[in-house]
Amino acid sequence: MKRLTILLLSFYLGIAAPAEGQIVHSSARKAIPLSRRQFGRSTPILVPQFSISRAKRDVFSGVLGVGSGVTEAASLSQLSQPAGNWGGSGCPPSAHLKSLVDSYIASASPDFPGLGSTVPGLSLSWSSPICGTFTYAAGLRNIEKDKPITPATLMGIASMTKPIIAAITLQLSDSGVFGPNGLDTTVNQLLTTEQITALTVGTDPLEPKCPDFTYLFNRDTFTYELKAFSCPDLSQVTLRHLLRANHGMYDFINEVLLPDGSAQYDNGLFFNLYQFLGLSPSPPLSSKNGFDYLKAYGLKQNQSAEIGGNNGRDFEVSFGNTGFQLLGIILEQRTGKSLDELIRKIIVDPLKIDPMYLYVEKAKRESLIADGYDVYTGEPLIELTGVYPIVNLNGHTALNTLSLGLGQPGNVNLAGGAGGLIANPKSYRIFFDAFVNGGLLSPAAQSELVQSFVEIPDLSFPEQSLSNGFGILKVQLREVPGLPSVDILTHGGALPGVRCENAVLRLPDSNTILATGVICQNSAFGASDPFHLELAFINAIASMNGGQ
């Protein structure tokens, strides 16, 4: 039976990710084939994580294309024309950029010969101080009703939420919200005793959540092990640690399994199917706020990770699910405002961009936001059980993710600071450019961001190095075959029904900006990888005016 486990580490980061149900020193029940380990798409695949493989390190010279085999099933009849003023001497023509998108969205997956594209719709926006702006959307935001996607269409952006939370944290720190120690203030000073108890020990003194035993991800061996864990000492963890994701705690989504060996997130996601199969899954969580969401999982200390360390094992595998979920809670607690209010005041209004939301009510989600789709072609648990309504995506079996999580899509978007944001790529590109390159933060806050990057030596090589900062990773490419020598600042995202990439391109060891771009598609599992399209844009843009 086809595995439906999303192990993004195995493809994205060049490691031997744990096989489905692989848990060492355990007799826990294996996850059923539909179980999906959703490793947050936070790490660029340019740098293999935690292992060195020459084959993997050289693979990027062969991924400059964006697909293979244009199929008739992927109709381009509704494609719009690009917006913006892109052009100029040395700039790749706008028509060429459009052709890259059209080719990508029409390309069939080599895994499914004879079938069409696995991407319903895609929206992207790029800007360059040299060439201007290029904004384009193609395909559908809703397959069932044949609704086209436009540049204004709101989309889930998953882990691209984290830079937004980082920007708010930096700005509030500069204004004194966290006290005289700023980013070096410890978490225990910023939350109430009741909140800390709820997030660690839990509210039932007869059944404390920690210390305890469960299956935990080993960042050295990439296996799950039945291990003891303790409560984190939040008097040792600062805002700076949360922003860098080296806070000494496990990623609550990706690095912790339940005592029976299943994943809590997957239980909620496929609750109806698991019940149909006679299992007893834990129900989907309420996504009304980030605190309730994180409380249901709980915080767990990782004894193998050094707080503030800079080795690979010291960072969350997602580079920030736990850290940024906790940051979102702290921001709301310290200001008395919702994250939506803070986003509007600190991000949206100053930049004069379209609204962004975290806590989206059902009516707004169904009327304004692109539906997300995952592809399950050939999966009998989806195609034959009748549990979920099936959508025809160019001959593929697809699910509208509105069907998952008991039909409450908020349950799959990680409410809070880790990955719940809704935005359109054009507005997010304006934010990301202003955040990374200047124009949003105060001078002091911008300086904190610039100085936040720490190199991760065991994830770095002479031709490509990786540093992690506050919600942003920096990849420095130097003479990688088939790729330009540039610095890339990025933090992409993936959740059910959405995959996003972003990038700020700079000349090597320079503040000279080549371009800023954002790409989002409304399909994730089983779909084409938009990183291939981003690579094509990087190669086209970085070659201009001094790019190598």
Image (cartoon, grey):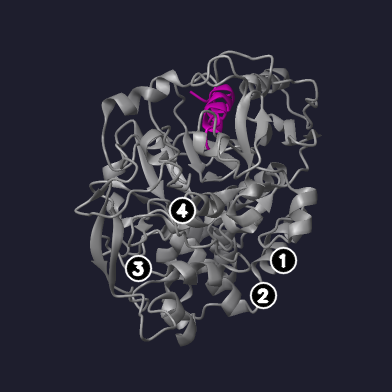
Q: In the image, which disc is placed on residue 345?
A: 1
In the image, the segment drawn in magenta is 525-548
Q: Residue at x 59, y 55 (%)?
A: 405
Number of the front mark, 1 or 3: 3
Residue occupied by mark 4: 278
Q: CA distance from mark 4 to mark 1?
A: 48 Å
Give the mark, 4 or 1, whose residue is nearer the N terminus: 4
Q: Residues within 10 Å of mark 4 (few under 14, many from 20)?
A: few
Q: Residues within 10 Å of mark 1 (few under 14, many from 20)?
A: few
Q: Residue at x 55, y 38 (%)?
A: 382
The type of residue carrying mark 2 is Lys
Q: Position of residue 514 (x, y in %)?
A: 58, 33
Q: In the image, which disc is placed on residue 300?
A: 3
SS type, badge 1: helix
Q: Quick check: marks 4 and 1 in contact, CB under 8 Å?
A: no
Q: Position of residue 48 (x, y in %)?
A: 34, 37
Q: Position of residue 352 (x, y in %)?
A: 78, 54
Q: Which of these two is toward me, 29 or 68? A: 29
Give the mark, 4 or 2, whose residue is nearer the N terminus: 4
The type of residue carrying mark 4 is Gly
Q: Which of these two is toward me, 20 or 198? A: 20
Number of the front mark, 4 or 2: 4
Q: CA distance from mark 3 to mark 4?
A: 30 Å
Determine whether 58 is above or below 519 in the image.
above
Give the mark, 2 or 1, whose residue is nearer the N terminus: 2
Residue occupied by mark 2: 337
Q: CA distance from mark 1 to mark 3?
A: 33 Å
Determine whether 459 is above or below 90 in the image.
below
The answer to whether any part of residue 356 appears in the image is yes
